[in-house]
Image (cartoon, helix red, strand yellow):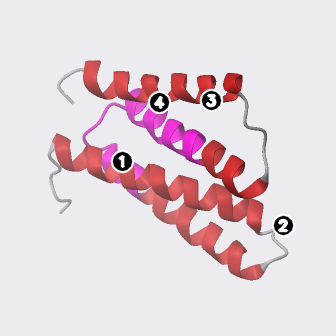
């Protein structure tokens, strides 16, 4: 029998799933086209856990909100780590766009329905 999730627990699970999305996307880049096996393994495990936790969170949260937050966390994290570790461009426009994603995620959480 599945365990009932409270909305707060579902949000915490969703955040962890989003953080794991950052892990798998960055480790996929580090795997160099899946030629570095340690990073390939990290990618596969983190992706599997991320999807599984997203599925758990969806028991309680609306799919549109949960999916947008999950991908938003992943997009922001991957963009920031891409700048920090992979030498991707760091411009005011790019930072502004990342900030819009963050505000969107916060808006979905704070302005959403009872979930």
Give how far apart the Cα atoms at labels 2 and 4 are: 28 Å
Q: Which mark is residue 95?
A: 3
Give how far apart the Cα atoms at labels 3 and 4 are: 11 Å
Q: Is residue 77 above or below residue 91?
A: below
Residues packed near mark 1 inside 10 Å, few (<14), some (14 to 19) or many (20 plus): many
Q: Which mark is residue 102?
A: 4
Left or right of 94 on screen, residue 61? left
Q: Which mark is residue 32?
A: 2
- Residue 37 falls within the magenta-colored stretch: no
* Quadrant showing the C terminus: top left
Disc nearer the start of the sequence (1/2): 1
| Residue that lies at the very extreme toward the bottom in this rendered image | 38
- Circles 1 and 2 in contact, beta carbons < 8 Å: no
- Circles 3 and 4 in contact, beta carbons < 8 Å: no
Asked if one can make out residue 55 in the rendered structure from this viewpoint, the answer is no
Q: What segment carries the magenta color?
A: 53-77
Left or right of 61 on screen, residue 86? right
Disc nearer the start of the sequence (1/3): 1
Instruction: Determine whether the residue tagged by mark 4 lies in a helix, strand or loop.
Output: helix
The image quarter in which residue 44 lies: bottom right
Instruction: Determine whether the residue tagged by mark 1 lies in a helix, strand or loop.
Output: helix
Q: Which mark is residue 14?
A: 1
Q: Foreground mark, 2 or 4?
A: 4
Q: Is residue 65 above or below residue 25?
A: above
Q: Foreground mark, 2 or 3?
A: 3
- Residue 69 falls within the magenta-colored stretch: yes
The image quarter in which residue 39 lies: bottom right
| Percent coordinates x, y for residue 74 in the rendering | 55, 45
Q: Nearer the viewer, residue 36 or 83?
A: 83
């Amino acid at each position: 029998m599945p365990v009932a999730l409270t909305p707060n627990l579902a949000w915490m699970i969703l955040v962890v799933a989003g953080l794991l999305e950052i892990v798998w996307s960055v480790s996929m880049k580090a795997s160099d086209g899946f030629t570095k096996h340690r990073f390939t393994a990290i990618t596969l495990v983190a992706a599997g856990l991320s999807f599984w936790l997203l599925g758990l969170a969806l028991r309680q949260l609306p799919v549109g909100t949960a999916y947008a937050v999950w991908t938003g966390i992943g997009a922001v994290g991957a963009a920031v780590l891409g700048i920090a570790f992979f030498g991707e461009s760091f411009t005011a426009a790019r930072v502004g766009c990342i900030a819009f994603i963050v505000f969107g995620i916060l808006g979905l959480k704070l302005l959403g329905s009872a979930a």
